[in-house]
Image (cartoon, rainbow, N blue to C red):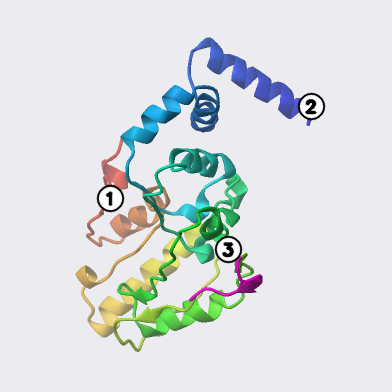
Amino acid sequence: DEIFRDIFHGYKQALKAKRKLDFDDMILCCYELFSQRQDILNAWRRKFVYILVDEFQDTNNLQEAILLRLAKYNTNIVVVGDVSQAIYQFRAANVENIVKFPNKLPDCKRFALVYNYRSDEPIIRFANETMKYSIYEYHDMKLGKRYNPERDCYESRDGQQLPEFHVYANTDAEDEAVISEMMRLHDDMGVPYSHMAVLSRTSAYTSGIETKLSHYGIDYDKRGGKKFLETR
């Protein structure tokens, strides 16, 4: 802990010397500014008449505090989120922000978006079964009880192919398995490569599979950035 404090202190001193802020500083300094300067807070309240926040389940306490200060007198605010998709608690996100949000604004209304237009029935059924084990529930302070929201999703189209779950020793083995399955579908079942897609959370994860696609002579298009072999 002492070593970490020394490193962090040096880091903060370096930022101050260069007159720079990191992402966490921008949130903290915004909160402090709104706390100390009512005139500045009021100016920003007048600027943002309507507020929309996406992925609200991944906000932290400071972000929520800033938001509630902005919306204190003008409650034209919409937050969108899903407790089942809270994945940033390791970065201080607090899922309770969305769980308890309906109780923090008196006239808040909640709408459940339960129809999924992206995935077919087997995938939706798998997701519903998985999320039955979610530990999060909404708490209705007015009714004095806990209850589950409309958690189940409903598909908009049918499907037959069941989702598969695989675990690999490392990313190289995973990439090789994906390429092997693509080649099997192409060679044995006649599925064109142009009918296949590999989804990734960020483009930073695709360098390995792009390299293998090139190695096996499989042409591909990349959406959302340059191909790995085109970068320098």
In the rendered view, tell whether residue 192 sits above or below residue 211: below
**Magenta segment, which residues?**
142-150
Which of disc 1 and disc 3 is earlier in sequence?
A: 3
Give me the disc on residue 2.
2
Amino acid of disc 2? Glu
The crowding category of the residue bearing disc 3, from other C-alpha atoms within 10 Å (few below 14, some 14 to 19, many at least 20), is few
Amino acid of disc 3? Ala
Whether tag 1 and tag 2 are in contact, CB under 8 A, the answer is no
Which of disc 2 and disc 1 is earlier in sequence?
A: 2
Which of disc 2 and disc 3 is earlier in sequence?
A: 2
Q: Looking at this view, is 91 or 164 the one in front? A: 91
The crowding category of the residue bearing disc 1, from other C-alpha atoms within 10 Å (few below 14, some 14 to 19, many at least 20), is few
Residue in view at x 60 percent, y 71 percent: 134
Q: Where on the picture, by quarter, is residue 47?
A: top left
Give me the disc on residue 224.
1
Residue under pointer 3: 169
Query: Is label 3 or label 2 in front?
Result: 2
Residue in view at x 34 percent, y 64 percent: 198
Amino acid of disc 1? Gly
Secondary structure mostly taken by the magenta-highlighted segment of the chain:
loop
Q: State the image coordinates of residue 112 (x, y, percent, origin top left).
A: 42, 71
Whether tag 3 and tag 1 are in contact, CB under 8 A, the answer is no
Q: Looking at this view, is 211 or 125 the one in front? A: 125
The crowding category of the residue bearing disc 2, from other C-alpha atoms within 10 Å (few below 14, some 14 to 19, many at least 20), is few
Q: State the image coordinates of residue 21 (x, y, percent, origin top left).
A: 49, 23
Whether tag 3 and tag 2 are in contact, CB under 8 A, the answer is no
Residue in view at x 34 percent, y 34 percent: 46
Q: State the image coordinates of residue 18 (x, y, percent, origin top left).
A: 49, 12
Whole-angstrom CA distance, mark 1 to mark 2, is: 42 Å
Q: Where on the picture, by quarter, is residue 163?
A: bottom left
